[in-house]
Amino acid sequence: MSTVRRRSAAPTLGVERAFAAHGHRYIAGCDEVGRGALAGPVSVGIVVVDLDAATGLRGVRDSKLLLPAQREALVPRIRRWSVACAVGHASAAEIDELGLMAALRAAGSRAWATVLETVTPDAVILDGNHDWLSARAQGLLFGTGDGGAAPVEPGGCTAPVHTRIKADLKCLSVAAASVLAKVERDALMVSLAASHPAFGWDGNKGYATEGHRAAIDVAGPSEYHRKTWRLGSADRPDATRIESGG
């Protein structure tokens, strides 16, 4: 008995439109790529839609469900369709220094700052179940004793952030953000592959393939590798974190 594989339903603006009941007009979809790679940045895409004008956008899916040529063809259409959009990056060195969540927030803050040049979103839909995008209160070096609140990180997202598991499959703005981030990060890794051919980044895009790990065993990590992670085929005692994910 054969099994017929059905294509998943296309994402819609249904979730985004629900925000109109709260008086919101500009809704931002946000997603990241590169979280689980061994090399290269984490990249965060943001796409803003105007609920008073937005219509559907045929062909957009979560970036993982599309072929490279399909993703690339969608980029100019997404840019015309959205009110504003941007992709921000945080480097491997920043991931090592700050940790993954803080690096994601740095990348998201860079995309957010670009979006703000055009429009201020009323709310954000963020893929996943953890809000790594919102600006965080900074700890005070010395307590003042007056009970005052710690200052908030400058430049970060201060709009309400609503996390949603598998938003990239259901929310059109989030799926569009994932496409923009994936295309831009993939292009960056392909460009880096020219000067680092041993690692095969034009094919693996920095992710943990067997060939990529074997190349690290032979050549050692480059300046674009996340050196606090397990990189080669054997555990290193000084690798303080092991990351996984998409």
Image (spheres, rainbow, N blue to C red):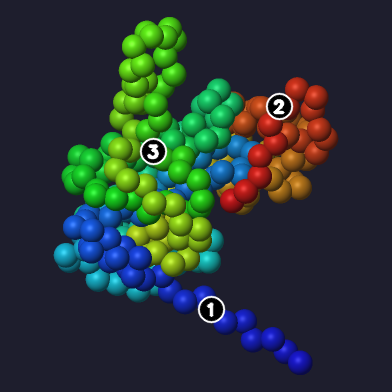
When asked about the image quadrant of residue 143, the answer is top left
* Position of 113 relative to 237 (above/below): below
Residue that badge 1 annotates: 7
Residue toward you, 116 or 184? 116
Q: Vertically, is 150 above or below 102? A: above
Q: Residue at x 55, y 23 (%)?
A: 97
Amino acid type shown at disc 3 = Ser
* Quarter of the image with the N terminus in it: bottom right
Examine the rendering and report whether any part of residue 219 can be seen.
yes
Name the residue that disc number 3 marks. 134
Measured as percent of width and height from the top left, residue 191 is found at 50, 41
- The residue that mark 2 highlights is 240
Question: Residue at the location (55% across, 34% down)?
Answer: 100
Nearer the observer: mark 2 or 3; the answer is 3
In this rendered view, identify the residue nearer to me: 190 or 60: 60
Q: Secondary structure at mark 1?
A: loop
Relative to 131, 109 lies left or right = left
Amino acid type, callout 1:
Arg
Q: Secondary structure at mark 3?
A: loop
Q: Is residue 49 visible?
A: no
Q: CA distance from mark 1 to mark 2?
A: 40 Å
Q: Which mark is residue 189?
A: none
Other-residue count near label 1 (Cα within 10 Å), few / some / many at <14 / 14–19 / ≥20: few
